[in-house]
Amino acid sequence: MSVDTASRDAAPSAPRSRIQPWILMYHSVADPADDPYGITVSPDRLGHQLRWLERRGLTGVGVGALLRARAEGRGRGLVGLTFDDGYRDFADHALPLLKRHGCTATLFVLPGRPGGENAWDALGPRKPLLTEDGIRAAAAAGMEIGSHGLYHQDLTEASDDELRQETRGSRELLRRITGAAPEGFCYPYGTLDPRTVDAVRDAGYGYGCAIAPGPLAGDHALARTHISHADRGLRLGTKRALHQLHELHRLRRPGQPTPGGSR
């Protein structure tokens, strides 16, 4: 039996409202030839991946919109799309493709580095980040703007004051840039612990995106699926099925928090 068949057969045994949504994690959309971290997809590959979603009746949306739709019982057929770091190539390559395919996305930016570069990536290559004007343009084009902290710092190693600045401070700065306080936060490097999750919640964010949050899974620690240039149809299908199976397994384990409870 295939993984896809297994996940379909198992799905009725768990309440769908408690299954965390499938959220895809992108970073840079550019030439992936020099990509030591495996975080770059070419524009052509992104287009292929969006067409793959379309053919399966799936539409990519920002995470805030996805969570609201699910709360209202309208989440069927929706997939979360996120782009971390706020690279300038989002405006050049990703945005036109998203609009062409009728999708939106959440763009997690670093308001402490407008117009800067990805200095945190020791191996490079250096890539420019969106300016404040670029962030505002993405918001005007219908994209959700979320915070990725100020400087792309591992928050589990931050002091209490640094943690407040990275969460509450970045939210206020984005409010000044876009005119609206962001609803979502994305943990740099995907690292989190109970202290950082509490700080994100206390700063006023409605949700937080992680990668593999483990027992902290909930609205303020949402799991995401990393998408790379290597992901075509078969790999995408497998990743979707693995997400479903992981969620079913999580819900069957005793003592697991529901999506609303990250504490």
Image (cartoon, rainbow, N blue to C red):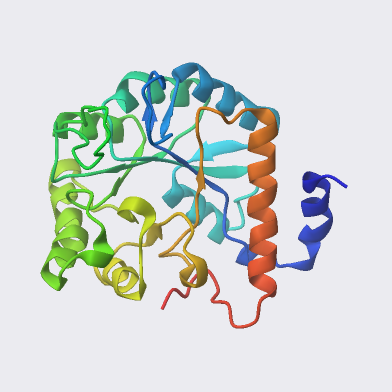
Residue placed farthest to the right in the image? 1
Q: How many discs mark residues in the rendered view?
A: 0
Residue 98 position in % (x across, y down):
46, 26
Q: Name the image quarter holding residue 221.
A: bottom left
66 or 148: nearer the viewer: 148
Q: Name the image quarter holding residue 178.
A: top left
Q: Residue at x 41, y 22 (%)?
A: 32
Q: Residue at x 51, y 37 (%)?
A: 227
Q: Is residue 146 left or right of residue 78?
A: left
Q: Is residue 47 left or right of residue 169?
A: right
Seen in the picture, residue 167 relative to 35 is either above or below; the reply is below
Q: Name the image quarter holding residue 16.
A: bottom right
Residue 174 position in % (x across, y down):
18, 48
Residue 3 position in % (x across, y down):
78, 47
Residue 183 visible here: no
213 or 57: nearer the viewer: 213
